[in-house]
Amino acid sequence: MANDALALSEIDAFYGDSHVLHDVSLRLGDGRLLGLLGRNGAGKSSSMHVAVGLLPPRRGAVTVYGRQVTGRAPEAIAALGVALVPQGRRVFKSLTVRENLAVAGRRPRGGLPMLWTLETVATLFPRLRERGKQIAGSLSGGEQQMLAIGRALMSNPRVLLMDEPSEGLAPQIVAEVMSTIRRLKAEGLSIVLVEQNAKLVADVADDIVILNSGRVVVEGSAADLRRRGIDLRQHLGIY
Amino acid sequence: MDMSLTLVLAVNSLTLGGLLFLLSAGFSLIFGLMKIPNLTHGSFFMLGGYVAASLIGWGVDFWSAALLSGLLVAAFGGIVERLILRRLAGAELAQVLVTLGLSFMVADVCLTVWTGDPIRIDTPSALRGATSVLGVAFPAYRLAISVIAVLFAAALWALLDQTRLGAMIRAGVDDPAMARVVGIRVSRLFTLVFCLGAWLAGFAGVIGGPILSVYPGLDQEMLPLALVVVILGGSGSLLGSLVGSFIVGFLYNFGQALFPELAYVVLFLPMLVVLVLRPQGLFGRQAG
């Protein structure tokens, strides 16, 4: 649908010979937060890689605000306002914190005001300001996560994909990251939150999709799933 | 060895060091950033000299010829990178063979166009004669080459380390896939780096002309020197290239004067030692 911020339709994708996504369809509504759940290896990160152009699908279509981007280069998809906070953070380790942010800087599309700059990102994450000249590889895990989020915001995206932002972080840092996500959502950003932890997602998601072995096994609005009495944990193998 | 000979050798070493820096900085950037062992780099040097000699013959002044010849070599380098090396990304053996083959082809074409006779490029008139430093007379042009090399080293450092463009290039080296996701056009930047390296080599070939002349085989004489510099200094490190260039400049000149039969041993032995004991080079980053 044209008012979807991001849609994957009937995607089949492979890593080499390994068939990682089977007929996967996901829709992220404008201004909504989609929680994407599943066990390790369920295809969550692969779906994100398809969305940003790192993994061209063998079949199916990817659209950003109704525009076909299937098979386009990652830098072209980034220019349409899609940003990724990747699994494992993947900050540019030999660059300083400031450089990590600066290289991702981009004006928003359609002459909108610059919401995110070095200044506003540093206000959101004061620790990044303190560490501005430090080499990113020397930051703690939590600081690298903030940097990865800040870097994604610097491109002034319309669609933010967050791949397991809580992974490997201490509980109080996870809480900090989750409150940032709530705030970004309140500002109107369309967000996909990939998680293994169902509880984190259940609190903030408007819609939920669960993947298992590269297939969509559950989908619906969070309220709908609650009404139907579906226990998310059951599908994640946590009893 | 008497004092004046030592002084002459020292000045010659500084000059060769300067030329080697311009040559090897490009080689080091291309190898360090793009992982391409570019064996056509010596050809870029020779081609730069030949093209400039022709330009000067047509009445272009020395410095304009140096800039322009560098640009033509850079354009040639860009074509090689986009049309050939791009398709061989990650295949180092194929890159070695292709760039080596290309260097033979360039040598043949040069031989056809510029014949087998050495061509001398005249020293630019403003730098002919000697400059007096602390009462000792030095050939002005030779000193100018070392100064130019140091200025280029500073400019390259500023470009790579202090600008957003430089940070984008380094981001592309750190994690090319993620850099693209962030919106950086990595492929375009790498072409730019390759052209810059080719430009430096071509430019070096021109300003080396008044000292070395341009002749068939110059390419294959310069390439091993650049390799030694990069191995000594560490690939991808500008400081390493600068220091390595002057070390090789001194080893080469003093080696030839003191142990003429063993000049290559003096030159390559330190390279072997560094390779065995410190494979990342004196200033290179530890791999992995």
Image (tube, rainbow, N blue to C red):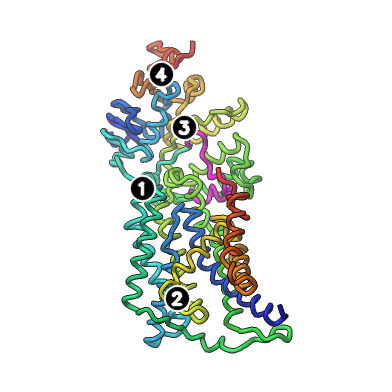
Q: Is residue A96 magenta?
A: yes
Q: From which residue to which does the magenta span run? A: A86-104
Q: Chain of mark 4?
A: A
Residue drawn at (45%, 28%), measured in percent from left and top?
A: A194
From the image, state whether disc 2 or disc 1 is nearer to you: 2
In the rendered image, residues at marks 3 and 4 fall on the same chain: yes
The residue at which mark 1 appears reads as A76
Q: Is residue B242 visible?
A: no
> Which amino acid type corresponds to the residue marked 2 in the rendered image?
Leu
> Which amino acid type corresponds to the residue marked 3 in the rendered image?
Asp
The residue at which mark 3 appears reads as A163
Q: Is residue A236 magenta?
A: no
Task: Estimate the spatial distance between the alpha carbons at disc 2 and disc 4, rounded to whole Å.
Answer: 68 Å
Task: Estimate the spatial distance between the alpha carbons at disc 4 and disc 1, rounded to whole Å.
Answer: 35 Å
The residue at which mark 2 appears reads as B67
Task: Estimate the spatial distance between the alpha carbons at disc 1 and disc 3, rounded to whole Å.
Answer: 20 Å
The residue at which mark 4 appears reads as A223
Neighbour tally class for label 4: few under 14, some 14-19, many 20 plus, Cα within 10 Å: some
Residue drawn at (52%, 80%), measured in percent from left and top?
A: B211
From the viewer's perspective, is residue B148 above or below residue A99?
below
* C-beta proximity under 8 Å, tags 2 and 4: no
From the image, state whether disc 2 or disc 4 is nearer to you: 2
Please identify the dominant SS of the magenta region.
loop
Residue extending farthest to the left is A59
Q: Which mark is residue B177?
A: none
From the image, state whether disc 4 or disc 1 is nearer to you: 1
Task: Estimate the spatial distance between the alpha carbons at disc 3 and disc 4, rounded to whole Å.
Answer: 23 Å
